[in-house]
Image (spheres, helix red, strand yellow):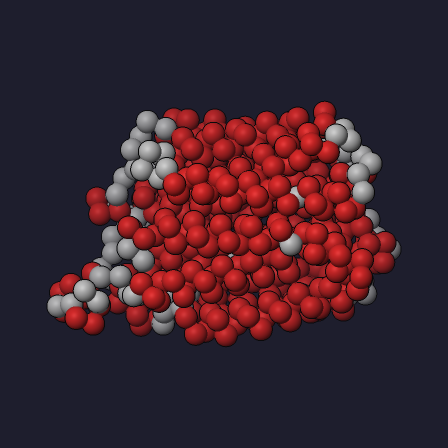
Amino acid sequence: MTAETQSPTAALTAPVVTAKHRRLLIAVFAISSSMGYIAMIQIIPVILIPMATDLGTSRTAIAAASTVSTLTGALAAFPAGRVLDRYGGRAVMTSGAAIGAIAVVLWAQATSLPEVYVSFVLIGFSITMCTYEAAFAVLVFATDPGHRDRAIITVAMIAGLATYLVYPVLGWMNGEFGWRTTLLILGVAFGAAAVPGHLWIIPSGAVHRRQVAHRNGVPIGTALRQGRFWLLLIAFVGQAGSVSAFLLLAVAYLVDVGHSMAAATAMLVGIGVMQILSRLVLTTFARRIRLVPATSIAFAIQALGLLLLPLAGLSVPLCVLCVAAVGVGQGIGVIARPSILADSFGVAHFASVLAAITVPMAIARAGMPLLGAWLGDWRFLVICGALALIGALALLPMVRVPPVEAAAF
């Protein structure tokens, strides 16, 4: 029975989107998140060396630009979450996509480090407003629990695969056109796809408020007083800092130890492949696998790969295995966080609760790349591995605790 044929009482509690609308939301978010991450994040390790050379600065200084964007995103996360809770995602995500496209175009024109930093301030706002965090919040608000996890997994699966399969293409574009033209192409393409897509498909503020008024959830203050919130925070903050530093510095590290640029960028495809495989396994065996223990195992696998990578040397098969292990942790972690939080704390205040974990995650993502770039060798991999291991251990006390349904609140 469609929403249009339901009784008034049923319509109040039914999902705000039809099956067709849900599929369109998934498609638009998969495309916009993929293009946003490629243009604003994934391109950085590919152009890190030529960009530093062209601007006459160090790799650490360029890595600091990513830190600027991450800290900006941290500042914006909680206000953006409150706006998402109250008004929905249409205005936030459309504006965020426009800001991001403009920022990448400005980045392509930068001739000095301060200009790069200004661009990355805007990128920080955009990432918070229009990529995974906001998209998952909209999906949690707009879909019923029975379709929520599959919608989140589908968006993350498509975007995860696209953002890592694209590395060889980005390497080719950088070699063929240079880093400035590559950025310009990516920025224009991102804006042309994401801005109209978000404006067209995301439910309006009025529709959002009507639906959320009949959904349950724990206020942020209550969530902060629960021990499981802090366990989840430790787990996801540790994993986020680990993977952030690795993704930014992986290509430079592999090149420094003797691999070619082509080999280094190709190895990162393994992250995307393992992201997809881990999510396919989770989807296929969803009724048999509990998300919390699966996430703990995935984080432990990521830790093992990072700790063993310095020992792999120039062995391409061993390096690929170690790099791919990061994809397992990232693949499960991205979809586990919104799903576990929605199960544990409900929907009505979901974006605010998500933001409360996103802020310290952003700080970890900001600090770890700087530390890794400063160390400049295998030591950053050991630190990244240790952080992922801490994340895995933090989830162990929750393994035997069943998820709390949102309806219980």
Q: Going by the image, does 330 lie left or right of 395? A: right
Q: Is residue 163 above or below residue 344?
A: below
Say whether residue 28 is visible: yes
Please give the name of the residue rendered at 64% of the width and 32% of the height, measured from the top-left corner: 322
**Which of these two is toward me, 405 or 46?**
46
In screen coordinates, is 295 left or right of 307? left
Residue at coordinates 71% horizontally, 64% vertically from top-left? 183
- Residue at left 58%, top 61%? 35
Q: Quadrant of residue 87?
A: bottom left
Residue at 65% from the left image edge and 40% from the top image edge: 246
Q: Indicate left or right for 268 with 298 as reference.
A: right
Residue 180 percent across, percent down from the top left:
77, 65
Residue 243 appears in the rendering: no
Residue 378: where, in percent of width, then height? 74, 31
Return the x and y of residue 152 as percentages of the image width and height: 41, 52
Left or right side of 367 for 330: left
Compared with 404, 349 (above or below) is below
Q: Residue 200's quadrant in the figure?
A: bottom left
- Residue 244 image offset from top left, x and y in percent: 61, 43
In this view of the protein, which residue sits in the foreground, 359 or 286?
286
Task: Compare residues 162 and 298 and report the one nearer the observer.
Answer: 162
Q: Quadrant of the N terminus?
A: bottom left
